[in-house]
Image (cartoon, helix red, strand yellow):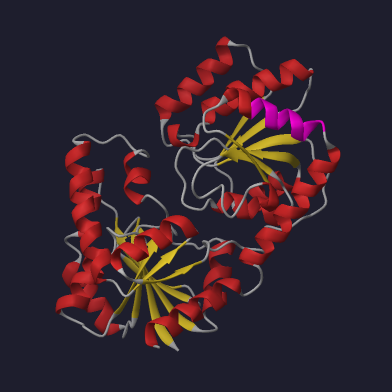
Amino acid sequence: MKNLLFYGTTNYGFELNESDKEKFQELSKSFSSFVITFGEDNKLINHNYVTIKYIKKPRGLINQYFKFYIFNFRKLIKFIKENNIEIISAKDPVSAFLPILIKKYVIKDLQTVIEHHGEFIDLLLNQRKFYLKRVIRKLLLIISNFTYKNCDLIRGVEKESTTKIAKKYTKKYIIFPAWVNNKIYFNKNLDRKNFLFVGNVIPRKGVLFIIEQFDKFVNQNKLDEKLIIAGDTPNKNYLNKCQNFIKINNIKNIIFTGKKNPQEISDLMNSSKLLLMASSFEGLPRVLIESGLCGLPSLASDIQGISSPFGEYGGTLLYKYNDAEDFMINIDKFYKDPELQLKLSDNSSKLCNSLSGENKFKKNWERIEEMLYE
């Protein structure tokens, strides 16, 4: 049984939620799992199936980046040696910088895996407001080029971008989606009425576009269905922009629920007719797998990471990105065709159960181990 370390700034918290417990419990059948991430304080906690080293998160984004990605070198070496870590999986090519340095110059038999979630740099730079974007982009490209060139394997979530990057650096690769808890997300056969958005309320997710088009749709068809927006609101300016639009146009059927836990999201998905998305960038959206496990079809922009493996054969109607007319054509087609609704629900369920069924995550990591040590 290999010792596997996940290295990145995923927010687990000192108390693991049920979904994370299930993930590490599944992995524990084949691996001893460890995590290094940020926390509210410096702590080392054994959560039964995983041991997590929490590094106290400093104030300020720049301080956070330097502390985790640069100044953590000696502590990371010590942790690897003390826990006999054999495989490190870095959350992205920047998180991989220190593990790759350690492999290259200190512990040469360490196996390194980089998670690839699509166009990482574009995702990062469009998620927050950065100054000196050109300088930051160039620096990230230099780091990514170094880490991809020296890693042992790339683990992608989406085929097109993963094969492209693996070919560029002549690396072994494997493709499988992020963990989704199929014991929480499953079809409960509830009555379905409302429309749903799940995710952070940020510009990249196109929430204002969805609000505008949904309002037109219900007004044109004289409907009383609601649009439920379930997600965190890290960008207060963008949230205010959305809420001001709602207020100015006297829209009554939009509900912001704030951040919800996985069980609450599952219940919302099971009581909704259609998931709405308008993203400009994605890796492979976990929300589409979660919704598919719940038998909830979706309407999403036709972009890389969504068009494949999703699409109508995977339970997702696609429209041209930011094209209001195409959005309206597709949502109208869905609403007026009960047979299409059933077909998409069935397609989404079949696809997502094939991607995230029982023990799929563990088996995929066993495949990674085989590829690293073949």
Near-viewer residue (322 or 108): 322
Q: Hey, which quadrant is residue 125 in on the image?
A: top left
Q: Position of residue 239 (x, y in %)?
A: 47, 27
Region of the chain picked out in magenta, as a range: 327-336
Q: Decide whether the magenta segment is chiefly helix, strand or loop.
A: helix
Q: As displayed, is residue 283 above or below residue 114?
A: above
The residue lying furthest to the left in this view is 105
Q: Is residue 315 visible?
A: no
Near-viewer residue (28 or 89): 89
Residue 11 located left or right of residue 133: right
Q: As displayed, is residue 55 above or below residue 372?
A: above
Q: Position of residue 270 (x, y in %)?
A: 74, 48
Q: Hey, which quadrant is residue 191 in on the image?
A: top right
Residue at 68%, 59% (x, y): give it.
351
Q: Position of residue 150 (x, y in %)?
A: 24, 71
Q: Position of residue 72 (x, y in %)?
A: 20, 65
Q: As displayed, is residue 274 above or below residue 2?
A: above
Near-viewer residue (366 or 250): 366
Residue at 40%, 25% (x, y): give it.
237
**Quadrant occupied by the C terminus:** bottom left
Residue at 69%, 23% (x, y): give it.
253
Residue at 58%, 61% (x, y): give it.
180
Residue 362 located left or right of residue 190: left
Q: Is residue 80 visible?
A: yes
**Quadrant occupied by the N terminus:** bottom left
Q: How many marks?
A: 0
Does the segment drawn in magenta span residue 52? no
